[in-house]
Image (cartoon, coloured by chain):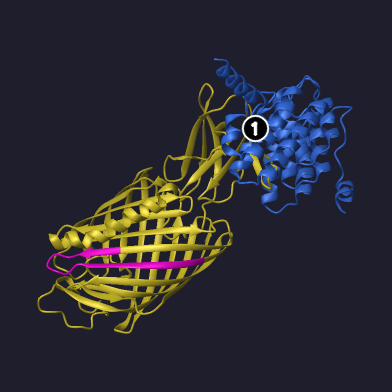
Amino acid sequence: MSRFAAIAGGVLLLALAGPGRVAGEPIDRRLAQRLDAPAAAAVWQVVESARAGGIPTDPLIATALEGATKRAPAEAIVLAVRQHAAALTASREALGEQSSPTEIEAGAGVLLSGVLADSLVRLRAMRPHGSLVIPLVVLADLVTRQVPVNTAAGALVWASGSGARDADLLRLRSRVEADIRHGVSPNAATLARARGLESNGPARAQQPALPRESAVRRRTTP
Amino acid sequence: MNRTHRTWRNPIRLLITIALLAGPTARVAAPRAQVGVSSWTGNPTFPQASVSPSFQFDGAHARVRGSGLATAADGVRSGQIDAALLLLPLSRRALELRLETASRDVPEGLPLTGGRAEARVHFTSGRSGAWAALAAERGRGISDQRFRGSGTLVGLGVWARSHGARVALDLEQRGAYMARPRLRSVSGSDSLATAPAPANAGDVPLRGTLTIARAAVRWEGERLAFESTGGLTLSLVGTPRRWASAGIRARLTPRLSAFATLGSQDRSNYVVPPTESPGTSVGIEIAQGHPDELRPLVDRAALSDWTVRRVDSGTYALGVRAPSARLVEIAGDFTDWQPVTLERTGYERWQFVTPLPPGLHRVNLRVDGGAWCSPPGVPATVDGFGGNSGQIVVE
């Protein structure tokens, strides 16, 4: 009996002290199935840190799964998840603690596109109470379509400040996309379409100015 | 009866093999059947009814298709199965492997079977491309006498597409092992017939190498499709033969079309009308999708008209237009980024119905096994892996 108790105690000790024992929850089943073990563990570590910091974790798991679907190397997946976690943290700081998880996620997409956090702060200042999801989605899209960061951010901050509705911003985006498809430079298309909003939309006394084409060119030309 | 069984056994065996090989990627089926009336010039037994069933299984990088023809009055039956597998599909120089087998059975005639293996290198650049091929061929028929392809067969081709139209120019060398039904032959149009017909057979056996120059144009609109093919067949055993055909298809419903064809066809395989004389056919086609026969496996359909339609509370139908696409797949956070094949809801539209909780969703599409891309017209953002993803906001 004492021998059995000794063996059982040893097994229990090994189980508690073994490498499979982790402090938090077990690794998400989807990560374990789609990634190799080291990559899944590394991603899960980032997820747990984000959870402890109050950051939305679903986008992080989704990024890892997206990388697996696109057959990205494990190192690239872990790096992308870490960058995404950092962007979510920065987005929450820039947009404010009261921002919704969807806003934080959209803001992270903007930051990952190369826009500075300062633009998110300015956007929040233009819309202190309204949702910023659509402006952020439109901003990320413009930058993804090679619109210079300063032009895109300036246009969105200006449009939000001038009282443009979400529908106006989505229309601006689709028109810029069409212009680019027809050969107009992304920078010129954004400025022209934003000026179209200026001529149609209500003007506000304290709204910021649209970036000038020459200034943009100076900033974006190496 | 035994002979017929023997004739069809090899293609069926090959089909099973190919289906097993291509099975994991064969995810979209496109069965088709044409029922019509055909008439050929100068032949007293026509017009007659004909049935032409066909099927096609499309995968991301593979295709298996088969077609057949059966005529009512003279009992001609022919069938063809071919399979293609694309290697290095995302490269600008993709390699395509093709297997083709065909069989033909004529009452009171002699059955024929043949096979062909081909390796084709594609060079693609957006909306145009070129290919070069090497092939080996083997045929059997006429008292089980065996024939082998005469050396290496080659092919060259170019193609381009724009605004729903496609143009293809091919130059191809093929082994010709055919039987011409002697009872239905028409003098003057069959330039290949040089040997006198055996007294105890219904077919005139022909064996030789054909050089075929072919030009084809196809235009496809919302409801109408037009296709025309013409060419010149050169042979050492006969005088050059020119042939041309044109066809039009009008879509009556998503799965029902009316078709009409006019002209003579290339006899480069065994699925042939009973005669080479010009003819006309009219009929009805029932089909799940209408594959673009001219489109190389390496060419991918374009996506347009992305829609998000609310079906009921929390459920949405995501749709996209992809004319002639073989396969459209979707992946997003709502599928845990597992690729899901969209359902074909007509010739051009593909759809996926899924629950979408409120929030921001990321989504990608992939057509014909190509690269993942954002849905057309959807705001995009970088994905962290060198590409981008579309973003959908559900309120």
Residue B387 is covered by the magenta coloring: no
Query: What residue appears at the point 35 percent right and 63 percent down from the top-left corner?
Result: B100
Give the prevailing secondary structure in the magenta stretch.
strand
**Left or right position of A59 against B214:** right
Which quarter of the figure is the C terminus of chain B placed in? top right
Q: Which chain is blue?
A: A
Determine whether B326 is above or below A105 in the image: below
Foreground of the two, B92 or B13: B13
Foreground of the two, B383 or B379: B383
How far across and how far down the image is residue A168, in percent? 71, 32
**Left or right position of A24 against B200:** right
Q: Which chain is yellow?
A: B
Disc 1: host chain: A
Q: Which residue is mark 1?
A: A61
Determine whether A4 is above or below B299 in the image: above
Foreground of the two, A212 or B273: B273
How far across and how far down the image is residue B13, in percent? 28, 57
Which quarter of the figure is the N terminus of chain B placed in? bottom left
The quadrant holding residue A7 is top right
How far across and how far down the image is residue B144, in percent? 20, 72
Residue furthest to the front in view is A2
